[in-house]
Amino acid sequence: MSLLETSHRRYNPLTDEWILVSPHRTKRPWQGGVEKTVVTVMPDYDPECYLCPGNRRNSGEKNPDYTSTFSFDNDFPALMFDQKASESTEELFQARPEGGRCRVLCYSPSHSLTMAKMNQTQVAQVIELWIEEYQALKNQGQYASIQIFENRGAMMGCSNPHPHGQLWANENLPNLWDKEMKAQAAYYEKHGRALLLDYVEKEIAKNQRLVFRNDSFAVLVPFWAIWPFETMILPRFPLGALDELGAGQKEHLAEALRSLTCRYDNLFLTDFPYSMGIHSRPLKQEAPGWQLHFHFYPPLLRSATIKKFMVGYELLAMAQRDITAESAAARLAELSDVHFSQEDSHEA
Ligand code: H2U
Ligand code: ZN
């Protein structure tokens, strides 16, 4: 039977894990609530926002009157770099010091200009901000990983709609980075090629899970996706880190990011929530075969309000999905990359 019809497992070669797919379940009757799309119109400036230009943050510090992007040390950092915890080596109670740096990255002075609504030049400015931040911390030499990420939407625990991301730099490699590093190194050892470069080429040839592509990048729903509309942005050329991007490649990345985030909003005519993050090459290890990539993890399942929960079997056994990666990709691919709020003919 085809993978699109009956329960099966799919392998995630990047983390060396299996996921469960149950496509036949999408045929069952839906008895949940009836959704209603709520589009809140946001002001360009919010006097209560701690990220808007000229406003005061909780720390008492005042933001400058910035006109493009702006970044600062998180006032409530999860990682400290000046205070060291003591070590515990007792076998069942191991603890080690963990130092690092946390930054907040404002994408725009406008309170309402999410990436989905930005033009390509504005997205390119965000990419420049990521590169500057990445380089500054890389040059300090003490961090193993620089995790740039964005939580968007209250559903993802984001405290503020002002377009922004975060950066956490760790002295030790985080769990998922470690898994991805080992898997990519093992593949490289076996084939002499980068896993994600082989993968993106095969996905382009198969053309079953592609959402968007240009000469430098492909946006796709990975074969092993867990979240309904999970995607990855993958470079089609060898690329370890953000600061290795050429000028044309930056433009292509901006185009891919804009196209994807805009399609996401158009899917359920809402400010589509997600967690997204950039995985660039670890800095303290060799990491052979590592390819830079973006992960997008959006929680929504069938409307602006109905999300997928990772509960029950998923907490206790393994991740599971109903709609297939193929059908999710097809839906995203057929959407317009003109934002619904900017489409003249649309009545939203
Ligand atoms: P979220 O978008 O995921 O809610 O994160 C916003 C970050 O901004 C959060 O980590 C920080 C919080 O610590 N923050 C400041 O640094 N200063 C403030 O005045 C408020 C929030
Ligand atoms: Zn704001």
Image: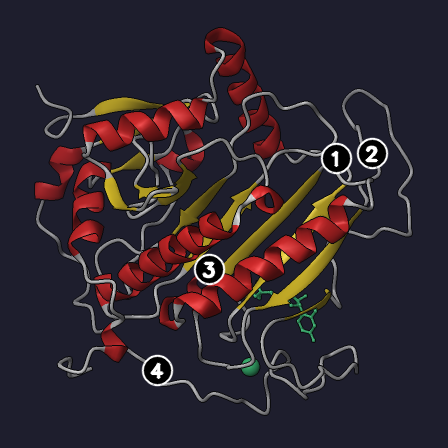
Residue that carries the numbered disc 2 in the rendered image: 96
Whether residue 210 appears in this view of the structure is yes
Distance of label 4 from label 1 (alpha carbons): 40 Å
Query: Residue 336, image x and y in percent?
Result: 19, 62
| Other-residue count near label 1 (Cα within 10 Å), few / some / many at <14 / 14–19 / ≥20 | some
Ligand 1 quadrant? bottom right
Q: Earlier in the sequence, mark 3 or mark 4?
A: 4
Disc sitting over residue 156 in the figure: 3
Amino acid, disc 4: Thr
Q: Is residue 33 above or below residue 85?
A: below
Q: Which element carries disc 3, helix, strand or loop?
A: helix
| Residue at the top extreme of this rendering | 190
Q: Is the residue at mark 3 in contact range of ligand 1, meaning its CB lies under 8 Å from it? A: yes
Q: Quadrant of residue 223?
A: top left
Q: Earlier in the sequence, mark 4 or mark 2?
A: 4
Q: Earlier in the sequence, mark 3 or mark 2?
A: 2
| Colour approach in the figure | secondary structure
Q: Which element carries disc 2, helix, strand or loop?
A: loop
Disc sitting over residue 336 in the figure: none
Q: Earlier in the sequence, mark 4 or mark 1?
A: 4
Query: Residue 76, image x and y in percent?
Result: 74, 65
Q: Is residue 208 above or below residue 12?
A: below
Residue that carries the numbered disc 4 in the rendered image: 40
Describe residue 139's horizontal placement relative to residue 229 as left or right.
right
